[in-house]
C-alpha cells in the first residue's frame, strides 16, 4: 500500500507521512456567494399501523363444565399478556343428545356461547392451547375425533411452525392425567 493507505510508514517515508499529516490551510471563502439553506417540506408520514394482537386459539371439549372453567382461566391468563388475545372454540359433540341427557351432561348439550371450531380457520391462529378431559389415560373421544379431522391441514403443512400446548382435567387422582399429559 502507498502513502495514506492505512499502513505504518517505513523509515524512508516517515518525513513524507509527517508532511501529509500536517494541517493544510483552508481555501478562501471570499469568492463564494453566501447561500441560505431552506429545507424542503417533509412529506406527511402516516403512523405505522398498530401490530395485530397475537391470536391464541383455545380449542377444548368439556362434557360436565370442568374443562370450561379451566378454559376461562386460560383465557384470562392469555389476555393478561400485552398484545395477546385468546379466542375460544369448542370441538363438535359426537354423542347423540339422548345419551348426553342420560349421562347428565348438560354442558356438552347446549355448548353455550362458544362457537364450534372451524377447521378452515385454524391456520389463522398464531398458536394453540388444547383442553380436554382425560379418561383412563386417554383423551376424550370427541377431542380425538377433532385431531383426526385436522389431517388434511397437517398433510399440507398449514399448521407447521405454530406452537401448541395442552391442559387436562380428571375426576380422580389416578384418572389418567399422568399418562395423557
Image (tube, grey):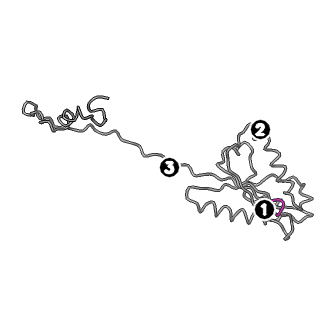
Side of 152 where 94 appears, left or right: right
Q: In the rendered view, would you say 93 is above or below 107?
A: above
Q: Which residue is mark 3?
A: 50
Q: Earlier in the sequence, mark 3 or mark 2?
A: 3
Can you give x and y, in whole percent of width and height, for residue 125 in the image?
A: 66, 48
Q: Residue at x 74, y 46 (%)?
A: 118
Quick one: which residue is furthest to the top in this view? 2
Q: Which residue is mark 1?
A: 168
Tell me the SS state at disc 3: loop
Can you give x and y, in whole percent of width and height, for residue 47 in the image?
A: 42, 46
Q: Earlier in the sequence, mark 1 or mark 2?
A: 2
Side of 34 where 92 appears, left or right: right
Side of 27 where 95 appears, left or right: right
Task: Tell me where the magenta segment starts and ends, as one range.
Answer: 177-181
For the residues marked 3 and 2, what is the alpha-carbon distance in whole angstroms? 34 Å
Q: Residue at x 84, y 60 (%)?
A: 179
Amino acid at each position: 500500500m502507498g502513502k495514506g493507505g492505512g499502513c505504518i510508514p517505513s523509515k524512508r517515508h516517515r518525513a513524507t507521512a509527517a508532511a501529509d499529516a500536517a494541517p493544510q490551510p483552508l481555501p478562501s471563502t471570499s469568492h463564494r456567494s453566501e447561500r441560505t439553506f431552506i429545507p424542503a417540506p417533509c412529506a406527511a408520514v402516516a403512523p405505522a399501523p398498530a401490530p395485530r394482537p397475537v391470536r391464541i386459539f383455545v380449542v377444548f371439549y368439556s362434557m360436565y363444565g370442568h374443562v370450561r372453567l379451566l378454559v376461562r382461566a386460560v383465557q384470562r391468563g392469555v389476555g393478561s399478556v400485552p398484545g395477546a388475545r385468546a379466542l375460544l372454540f369448542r370441538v363438535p359433540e359426537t354423542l347423540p343428545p339422548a345419551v348426553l341427557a342420560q349421562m347428565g351432561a348438560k354442558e356438552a348439550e347446549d355448548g353455550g356461547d362458544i362457537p364450534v371450531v372451524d377447521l378452515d380457520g385454524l391456520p389463522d391462529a398464531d398458536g394453540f392451547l388444547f383442553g380436554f378431559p382425560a379418561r383412563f389415560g386417554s383423551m376424550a373421544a370427541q377431542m380425538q375425533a377433532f385431531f383426526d379431522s385436522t389431517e388434511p391441514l397437517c398433510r399440507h403443512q398449514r399448521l407447521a411452525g405454530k406452537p401448541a400446548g395442552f391442559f387436562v382435567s380428571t375426576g380422580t387422582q389416578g384418572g389418567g392425567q399422568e399418562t395423557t399429559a
